[in-house]
Amino acid sequence: MAPRFDFGDWWSKEEHEGTPVVVKMENPNWDMLELNGPPQSGGEIGKGRNKNAKQLTWVLLLKAHRAAGCVAYLATGLWTLLSAIQNRIIAPKASGVKLDKPVKGKLYRFIRAFLVTALVMLGIDYGAHMLGWHFTPPAGVNLINLPHAIYMGWMVIRLQYIGPALQLAADSCIVLFLIQSADRITQFMGFMYVKFRGIKPIPANPSFESDDPEMPDKGYPMVLIQIPMCNEREVYEQSISAVCQIDWPRTRMLVQVLDDSDDVETQELIAAEVHKWQLKGVNIVYRHRENRTGYKAGNLRSAMECDYVRDYEFVAIFDADFQPKADFLKRSMPHFKDQPKLCLVQTRWAFVNKDENLLTRLQNINLCFHFEVEQQVNGHFLNFFGFNGTAGVWRISALEDCGGWMDRTTVEDMDIAVRAHLCGWKFIFLNDVRCLCELPESYEAYRKQQHRWHSGPMQLFRLCLPDIIKSKKVTGLQKSNLIFLFFLLRKLILPFYSFTLFCVILPLTMFVPEAQLPVWVVCYIPAVMSFMNILPSPKSFPFLIPYLLFENTMSVTKFQAMISGLLQLSSSLEWVVTKKSGRTSEADLLAGVEDSKPQDQLQKLNRVTSESGLEALKKVQKDSAVVVPNAAPSLKKKKKNRLYWNELALACLLLTAAMRSLLTEHGLHFYFLLFQGVSFLVVGLDLIGEQVS
């Protein structure tokens, strides 16, 4: 409770013990200290009183200045948001430009109907509040008129029927929330145990050197390296270059560039790059499929059918934007020695553009937790985790034993990992071996990627459930882990309760006060979970609150994808290649420009990572004075920011619920709904990632 100052009683006293106030004028904070001094006499008393009054005035002025600064900051943010709304929605309509049509899916229609109902209920409740009517039916109420009687009847129906049903749904989601939180806490405790004990896989004999002086490379196993790609114009060069520079005997390594591109110019560029490395003595081949059936899985399966693959024992896979370090094989391959049941060595990803924008920063938090906690803990305690599809090495005999690559789902990497696990093979995750790659920088690319990652597991679960139950090579505990934790809890329940609890039930409880969500469900536990998620990437702590809000915002996409995969809808079979920008580090980029030809310089300059290297790159571009008369068709394509109508409709719904919460003083619920609604609005206007001017 704020202190009460009674100035009349204070100044009416004949004697007053002065309490001088010392104000530290330190920007941006100030401190107020009270120092008890000895009693003053005579004229000094009046002087002390005058001094205290002036100092108190300064304190109040400082408080007012700080409040004004906060209001100005919020006003600036609001003005920016309103400007974005004007640029994305109002201005195009005024100029006659056609906006993206709302997706007429069932989820969008449900959210729109929910929003209309919420607006009607808000109007009714606001009118009742202005008339002084009660929001809950008190005993022995006196009916004033017919509208009041109808309103009180609605209160009775809400109290006896709607409220209990909504509370039951809320309690069910809370139970799922607590179970998933317990699983997350257990994983985090396992991570802390592994971290503080310094546990990591260590090969017994890391050397492959042969004792035969005439054949020193004889001890190195034969390794096949595959780079599947499809229209990867921006990243093919850096990926092929990185793989060809891996430190491994040339006679014991073969690189396959598996190109599914349908653009003729891109095919020619990739083939020319492969030919360039062939001239340098690298054992590399270029394969192009005319028939792109099966997407990535079909591409990999086709490559494994080549006759020369029989000469190789292991296969390393890198997606087109991955840039392994030169020692990648020398740090990963030794783990296969003396472990005949080991089928997969998975390494961690590192991101060249994690600081590009807010979207990439939030993705970095998620993926750091995924690798350091989920993959590392499951690999250490269970000897199983989902293959990430790239930056890993497989034993070819294990691939053949579990049936090879299948294109029955959009998550072929998880599919083959589950089948290998059911066949009794083991897995190892190396957290200290990192492979550079690129994060999606636009929300559109990230959204499509997440849809594929969350619809595919549900497809796979439908297909693999009978095999899991019938498998005789895994224990009952391993089967339970696959069914209840790996698939149901983390792939189905998590997106289900995230969307249902925070986007449907929470707004409903604002209009039906008889059902309530405790504050610890809305704020405290999500804050703790977000804190744990962010610990593996401690530099991201300033983004704790945006991360919490963004994860709830993404629950719409993940829920829709989960339902699509579970019901085998047509959208669950869509495969969209994640768009890349060809990012690399500034140091590598500038070093490469210095030694390359002018034509190559411009190509490298088009792939800039961040603003920290812009000045140096501009200088190099100016000095090179390269002119390209005909830009590539892919560079001419005009990009634009999109509108996401599901998110925009949910933003309006949550903001409406926040306004309704003010009538019944829900406290923290109001702030959560307000900020979550703004988060949905920002994402719906496509302000979270790459911006197109």
Image: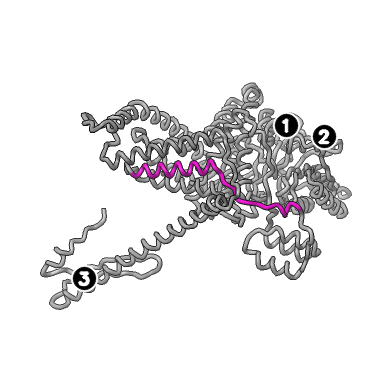
Rendered location of residue 344, percent (x, y):
70, 38
Identify the secondary structure beneath mark 2: loop
In the image, the segment drawn in magenta is 633-662
Looking at numbered disc 3 in the image, what kind of residue is underneath it?
Answer: Gly
Looking at numbered disc 1 in the image, what kind of residue is underneath it?
Answer: Met
Rendered location of residue 229, percent (x, y):
75, 44
Q: Main secondary structure of the magenta part?
A: helix
The reply to whether residue 595 is in sight is yes
Q: CA distance from mark 1 to mark 3?
A: 83 Å
The residue sitting at the bottom extreme is 43
Identify the secondary structure beneath mark 3: loop
Residue sitting at x 34%, y 69%: 24
Residue sitting at x 68%, y 48%: 579
The residue that label 1 is drawn on is 406
Give neighbour class at mark 2: few <14, some 14-19, many 20+ (Cα, 10 Å).
few
| 471 magenta-colored | no
Q: CA distance from mark 3 to mark 2?
A: 91 Å
Q: How many marks?
A: 3
Tell me which numbered mark, 1 or 3, is placed earlier along the sequence. 3
676 up-or-down from 471: above or below: below
Q: Which of the pair 196/547 is nearer the observer?
A: 547
| 645 magenta-colored | yes
> Do the numbered discs 3 and 2 sit on residues whose CB atoms are within 8 Å?
no
Mark sitting on residue 37: 3
For marks 1 and 3, give the one nearer the viewer.
Answer: 1
Mark sitting on residue 305: 2
